[in-house]
C-alpha cells in the first residue's frame, strides 16, 4: 500500500513534495493487534500528531508519516482483513476551519453554479482515485456509500460534523430514501452537531414538508454572488434549528442581502489552482451587515493559489464567531452568540 512522508522544510513550512514509499499498514499497527480498531487508528494518528509537533529539523529527520487519505478525508479507521490493512475510516480533525470532522456517506457531484468551477472536492476525488482509494474508484461521479451510513455513531466525542464535504446530499440523483437514512443517523447520534450545506436550495425547499429536521442539525446554503441570493429565501422556509450561509467562494459584491432568519454567515475567498480573486470591500460589506443584524460572522480565508500565505485576518483580526447552542434541553435557545468582534 502506498504511503506518504510529509516533511518540514528548514524554514518551518510544510514541504509540498510527497515522497512515495511502500508500506504495509498492518506492520504499523502490529503491536496494537489486541486493541479495538478504533483505538489502533487513534494510536497511529496520535503518534503522527506528536511527530508533527516536533521542531522542524527533528521532524525532517524523522520523516513524519501521514497516510494521504488520513490528511484528505479526516475519516480514518484501519480496516483489517486477514491481518492486512484494507482501508481507513475514522473521524479526525478536519482542515475546514468552521467544522471539526467530515462525514461523506455520498461522494461525487456535478456543477450547479459558477461557484463550482474550481471545485476542491472534484480535484481531491480524482487525486484519491489515482492513488487507488477504493471509496473514490468512480472519481467524482456521484456514488452512494451505504457502508458508511452509521459511521458517526462510533464517534463518541461530541463534534461538529460537516455532512457531505465531497458531495451535495440534495443532488437530484440522491434518492430521498437515502437522504432519510442520513437523517436517521443524525437523529440517533444526538451528541453530535451536524452541518448540512447545499447549493441545491430548490430541492431543499421541495422536500421541506417531508423532512423533520433534528435539533442537532444545522442547515445551510452556498451563496457565491448576488445572483444566487435567492437560495437564502429558500433556506428561510426550511424549519431547521440553525440556518447558515456559506459565502464561499465569494465571487462578487453582495450588496442586497436580507439576513432575517439567518443564524450564521461564513465568508471565504476561493483557493487552489485558478482561484478567482476576492476584494476586501466585499468581505467588509458582509461583515458590517452581520454586525447590523446581530448575526455571527466567520471569515474563513482570503484564498488564492496558496491560502496559507494569504491567511484569514480581516483588517488585522480573525473572525471566528459562530452560533452557540446547548444540547441540554429540547427547548434550548440558539440565538446566543460569541461577542461580535474579532480576535487580534
Image: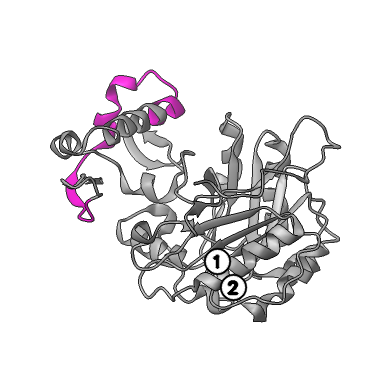
Q: Residue at x 29, y 20 (%)?
A: 31
The answer to whether residue 152 is magenta is no
Residue in front for this viewpoint, 111 or 274: 274
Q: What percent of the width, then of the height, locates residue 297?
A: 63, 55
- Proximity of marks 2 and 1: CB atoms separated by less than 8 Å: yes
Pick out the residue farthest to the left.
Answer: 61
Pick out the residue farthest to the bottom.
Answer: 227
Q: How is the image coloured?
A: one colour
Which of the labelled discs sits on residue 224, or is there none? 2
Which of the labelled discs sits on residue 205, or is there none? none
The answer to whether residue 34 is magenta is yes
Q: Quadrant of residue 85?
A: top left
Q: What percent of the width, then of the height, locates residue 176?
A: 72, 61
Q: Quadrant of residue 277?
A: bottom left
Left or right, residue 292 beside residue 79: right
Residue in front for this viewpoint, 187 or 5: 5
Which residues are drawn in magenta?
15-41
Q: Above or below — where is 228 with respect to 140? A: below
Alpha carbon separation for disc pair 2 and 1: 6 Å
Q: Can residue 174 be seen in this snapshot?
A: no
Q: Residue at x 39, y 68 (%)?
A: 304
**Callout 2 crowding tier (Cα within 10 Å): few <14, some 14–19, many ≥20:** many
Tally of numbered discs: 2
**Callout 1 crowding tier (Cα within 10 Å): few <14, some 14–19, many ≥20:** many
Q: What percent of the width, then of the height, locates residue 1?
A: 25, 45
Amino acid at each position: 500500500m502506498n504511503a506518504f512522508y510529509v516533511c518540514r522544510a528548514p524554514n518551518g513550512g510544510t514541504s509540498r513534495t510527497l515522497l512515495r514509499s511502500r508500506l504495509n499498514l498492518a506492520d504499523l499497527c502490529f503491536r496494537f493487534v489486541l486493541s479495538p480498531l478504533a483505538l489502533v487508528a487513534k494510536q497511529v494518528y496520535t503518534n503522527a500528531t506528536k511527530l508533527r509537533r516536533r521542531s522542524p529539523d527533528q521532524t525532517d529527520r524523522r520523516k513524519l508519516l501521514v497516510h494521504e487519505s488520513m490528511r484528505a478525508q479526516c475519516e480514518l479507521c484501519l480496516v483489517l482483513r486477514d491481518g492486512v490493512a484494507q482501508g481507513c475510516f475514522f473521524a479526525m480533525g478536519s482542515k475546514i476551519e468552521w467544522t471539526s470532522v467530515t462525514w461523506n456517506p455520498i461522494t461525487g457531484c456535478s456543477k450547479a453554479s459558477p461557484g463550482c468551477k474550481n471545485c476542491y472536492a472534484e480535484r481531491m476525488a480524482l487525486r484519491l482515485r489515482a492513488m487507488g482509494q477504493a471509496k473514490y474508484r468512480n472519481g467524482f461521479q456521484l456514488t452512494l456509500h451505504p457502508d458508511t451510513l452509521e459511521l458517526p455513531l462510533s464517534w463518541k466525542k461530541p463534534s461538529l460534523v460537516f455532512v457531505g464535504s465531497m458531495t451535495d446530499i440534495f443532488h437530484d440523483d440522491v434518492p430521498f430514501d437515502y437522504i432519510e437514512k442520513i437523517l436517521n443517523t443524525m437523529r440517533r447520534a444526538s451528541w453530535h452537531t451536524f452541518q448540512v450545506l447545499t447549493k441545491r436550495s430548490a430541492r431543499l425547499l421541495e422536500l421541506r414538508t417531508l423532512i423533520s429536521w433534528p435539533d442537532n442539525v444545522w442547515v445551510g446554503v452556498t451563496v457565491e454572488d448576488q445572483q444566487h441570493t435567492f437560495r437564502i429565501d429558500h433556506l428561510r422556509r426550511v424549519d431547521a434549528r440553525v440556518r447558515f450561509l456559506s459565502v464561499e467562494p465569494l465571487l462578487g459584491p453582495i450588496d442586497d442581502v436580507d439576513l432575517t432568519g439567518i443564524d450564521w454567515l461564513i465568508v471565504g475567498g476561493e483557493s487552489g489552482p485558478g482561484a478567482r480573486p476576492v476584494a476586501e470591500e466585499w468581505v467588509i460589506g458582509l461583515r458590517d451587515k452581520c454586525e447590523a443584524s446581530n448575526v455571527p460572522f466567520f471569515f474563513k480565508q482570503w484564498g488564492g493559489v496558496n491560502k496559507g500565505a494569504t491567511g484569514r485576518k480581516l483588517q488585522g483580526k480573525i473572525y471566528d464567531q459562530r452560533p452557540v447552542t446547548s444540547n441540554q434541553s429540547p427547548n434550548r435557545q440558539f440565538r446566543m452568540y460569541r461577542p461580535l468582534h474579532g480576535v487580534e
